[in-house]
Image: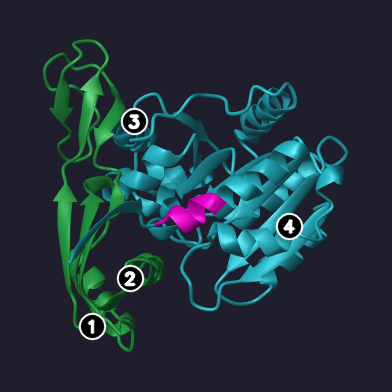
Chain colours: A cyan, B green
Amino acid sequence: MKVTVLKDILDANHQVAAQNRALFERHRLLVLNLMSSPGAGKTALLERTLRDLRGRLRIGVIEGDIQTTLDARRVERAGAAWVHQINTRGACHLDAGMIAPALAGAPLGRLDVLVIENVGNLVCPAEFVVGEDHKVVLSAVTEGEDKPAKYPLMFRESSLLLVNKIDLLPHLDVKLAAIHRAARRVHPGLRILDVSCRTGQGLPAFYAWLESQLERRRKGTGRGRKRTRA
Amino acid sequence: MHETSIIEELLAIVQRTAEENRLVRVTGLSVRAGEMRAVVPELMQEAFTVMSRGTLAEGATLEIESVPLKARCRTCRRIVRVEQFAFFCPRCGKALSEIVSGKELDLVQVTGDKGDSP
């Protein structure tokens, strides 16, 4: 006997993500899903952002790591308004079902922005929505120029690309323009900001983006841009 | 790596489908995976073989159909094949924004045996 099903295999995740999203919307919270390969500087970006925006934005962080609470401690020290660590115990990405229980005791009403720092990985996190407004991908110049071509879904799904560690450019045979070109090949019109989380260069543009997205969210216009889903 | 998570979800849907249709054994599954989904068929097969052990779908064949990535050009309105993930229209050179296929990850069909009537 043949049974026609025609169902999205990740439907269960989409449904939990929609519940998370409804909760975020009730609290008018801007939620970012921050993704990159390991060591590109996600936690460094958060530390710097938390320090620079102290008193301006109340930022909560959910840290996703396979093991350890090292990153949670780092962002806590940097001044996060709320921190929750998820250890995936082997799983290479966060999914909506891991985020939902973390939100149960979260002071969402006292936050402006929630950043979900995904597990360092350029493949799997792009597959699982968690209820975010935007995916933000971070790529360090030390990773070379070909990452967007090799991991197209990640760069295609993200609203913003932060090219990090630009202070190292003098020591590398990497051209920023080539990274931009590769990213816009898979995602024409992608918003790109070049930054250094070590020196702080370029970060004010990221903070301005953050604040403009938060304003949009507060006005209820939701995402900055419409997405076409196949 | 995400193949194991996908198979986990797949097996849950298969189990439900089998129960709803009173299948005692699942012999075949067909899945459609868009090119954008970065699914590695060999890894899917391996994960399926291991993870389906002890389930109704143990020993079932898993057929994975790859769906080509296509997008519509806003300027010339044509639907074009996106090669190498370069989202530009090969005819007019404009950016391709609207994906029409290649992002799906669907369970299409389950084949199985009905139990003998009690």
At label 2, which amino acid type do we have?
Ala
Is A228 within the magenta? no
Marks 3 and 2 sit apart, C-alpha to C-alpha, by 44 Å
Please provide percent x and percent y for residue B114.
23, 75
Please provide percent x and percent y for residue A129.
50, 50
Point out the image quarter for the C terminus of chain A: top left
Q: Which numbered disc flags the more N-terminal residue, 4 or 3? A: 4
Please give the chain letter of the residue carrying mark 2. Answer: B
B106 up-or-down from B101: above or below = below
Residue drawn where x is 27% and y is 44% of the image:
A149
Residue B18: numbered disc: 2
A102 up-or-down from A50: above or below = below
Question: CB under 8 Å between callouts 1 and 3?
Answer: no
> Residue under circle 1?
B116
At label 4, which amino acid type do we have?
Leu
User: Local crowd at mark 2 within 10 Å, few (<14), some, or many (≥20)?
Assistant: many
Please give the chain letter of the residue carrying mark 1. Answer: B
